[in-house]
Image (cartoon, grey):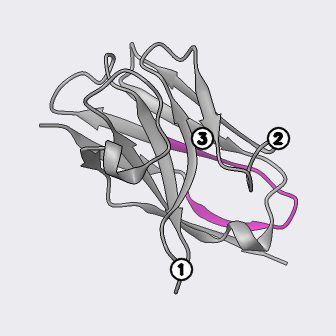
Amino acid sequence: QVQLDESGGGLVQAGGSLRLSCAASGRTVSSSAMGWFRQAPGKEREFVASVSWSGGNTFYGDSVKGRFSISRDNAKNTVYLQMNGLKPEDTAVYYCAAREGITAQWKASEFAYWGRGTLVTVSS
């Protein structure tokens, strides 16, 4: 069983940056692909980014390409999401997720473990 704990959310002005962290516990996730998803009020959950087990392959949702960057530190059992150029439409609860597989995926159904989320609010 894997427990995921997100942190780093908060209130930021448009154009600003935030770095989210996702610390895994229970067992190592060094052989698991990881991902970030988000859900805004009244909207469906949206894929943000995913990284393979080694960090060598990454995928991004179209709305965040060029602005967000996903990375991981397997020694720390932690995944990060660097968010730059934030926009009000990035406001959402951001969730970290872990797969049982090693390859990066964009479908939420591919991820077996989920954190409780961290709120990001971008003011205009």
Q: Are marks 2 and 1 in contact (CB under 8 Å)?
A: no
x%, y% of residue 61?
A: 66, 49
On the picture, is 94 further left or further right than 115? Answer: right
Question: Where is mark 3, residue-wise?
Answer: 81
On the picture, is 70 further left or further right than 14? Answer: left
**Residue 122, quarter of picture:** bottom right
Question: Where is mark 2, residue-wise?
Answer: 66
- Helix, strand or loop at label 3? It is strand
x%, y% of residue 116?
A: 32, 60
Which quadrant does the N terminus fall into?
top left
| Magenta-colored segment: predominant secondary structure | strand
Q: CA distance from mark 3 to mark 1?
A: 21 Å
Of pointers 3 and 2, the one earlier in the residue sequence: 2
Magenta span: 9-21
Q: Are marks 3 and 1 in contact (CB under 8 Å)?
A: no
Classify mark 2: residues with Cα within 10 Å, few (<14), some (14-19) or many (20+): few
Magenta stretch: includes residue 20: yes
Kindly identify the amino acid type of the residue bearing the numbered disc 3. Answer: Leu
Q: Say above or below: 93 vs 84.
A: below
Kindly identify the amino acid type of the residue bearing the numbered disc 2. Answer: Gly
Q: Say above or below: 30 vs 22.
A: above
Q: CA distance from mark 3 to mark 2?
A: 13 Å
Is label 3 or label 2 in front?
Answer: 2
Front residue of this view, candidates 29 and 111 = 111
x%, y% of residue 96?
A: 41, 48
Of pointers 2 and 1, the one earlier in the residue sequence: 1
Magenta stretch: includes residue 53: no
Which quadrant does the C terminus fall into?
bottom right
Question: Where is mark 1, residue-wise?
Answer: 43
